[in-house]
Image (cartoon, helix red, strand yellow):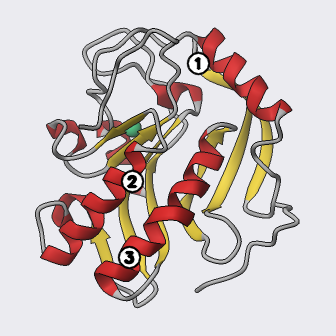
Amino acid sequence: MRYEKGRVRFRHGAVLAALALAACSAEPDRPAVSSYAAVSAARSCIAGALTAVTVDTVPIGPVHGPGRCGAIEAYSVTALGFAGDPIVAQPAATLSCGMIPALDRWVAESVQAAAMVAFGSEVERVSVASSYMCRAVARTSRLSEHGLANAIDISAFTLENGREITVADGWRGAPEERLFLHAIYNAACGVFETVLGPDDNADHRDHLHLDMADRGPNSTFQTCT
Ligand SMILES: [Zn+2]
């Protein structure tokens, strides 16, 4: 199923829950994320109208807690990408303002093109393993970017021809699946602040983690090499 996501923009189980609990338990060590930084970034994003409201991107107001978790404004996102080739996000992702244009850019500039090169078919749907979820990075007390609605985990891509490419099997799987997944991982490195996958650690063996963490002006942290 494809549909157009207009320029004038108005804008889903048990397996996923299990994935979400396992997801991103080992984001790399880096300076603690301050909620102040996240709020500041969100305000800038909202003031700059960087995320447009469409039928696929619906503001749901602030999300809170428990504890340190939350976002001053969150969106329920059911499709990624600009007009023309949007990709259904299933289940809907709860994301902060800054994540949405980054995902749109990644899809529009890289994901669909990579799918056409590798499979001759565009991506119709991504499986969202996790988005907003209040948790600390595993084995630490540091708040995960997921707790700020500032991260998404994607575990699978379903093509318009019905083929499903999972990160778990495809990363070291068939040549065309490796080509696709590695291409979009590398492209994500130019868009997001943090990109993690199966080569980074065992915790990411079955999904790509993408976030827009703000590490401050002096950070030299890099996830992509
Ligand atoms: Zn994650």
Say which residue appears at 61% left-offset and 84% top-offset: 2
Nearer-N-terminus badge (3/2): 3
Asked if the residues shown at circle 3 and circle 2 are in contact, with their CB atoms under 8 angstroms apart, the answer is: no
Q: CA distance from mark 1 to mark 3?
A: 39 Å
Q: CA distance from mark 3 to mark 2?
A: 13 Å
Question: Residue 210 in the image: x percent, y percent?
Answer: 43, 42
Between label 1 and label 3, give the one nearer the viewer: 3
In this view, 154 is above or below 59: below
Sequence-wise, which precedes: disc 2 or disc 1?
1
* x then y, percent, for residue 14: 39, 55
**Label 2 to label 1, Cα distance in Å?**
34 Å
Residue that label 1 marks: 66
Q: Is residue 199 left or right of residue 125?
A: left
Q: Amino acid at mark 1?
A: Pro
User: Which residue appears at 58% of the width and 55% of the height?
Assistant: 105
Using the image, determine if residue 159 lies above or below residue 161. Answer: above
Q: Nearer the viewer, residue 15 or 78?
A: 78
Q: Secondary structure at mark 3?
A: helix
In what element is the residue under mark 2?
helix
Query: What residue sits 80% from the left and 51% below the top?
Result: 52
Q: Which mark is residue 115?
A: 3
Mark 2 — residue? 187
Label 2 CB sits under 8 Å from any ligand 1 atom: no
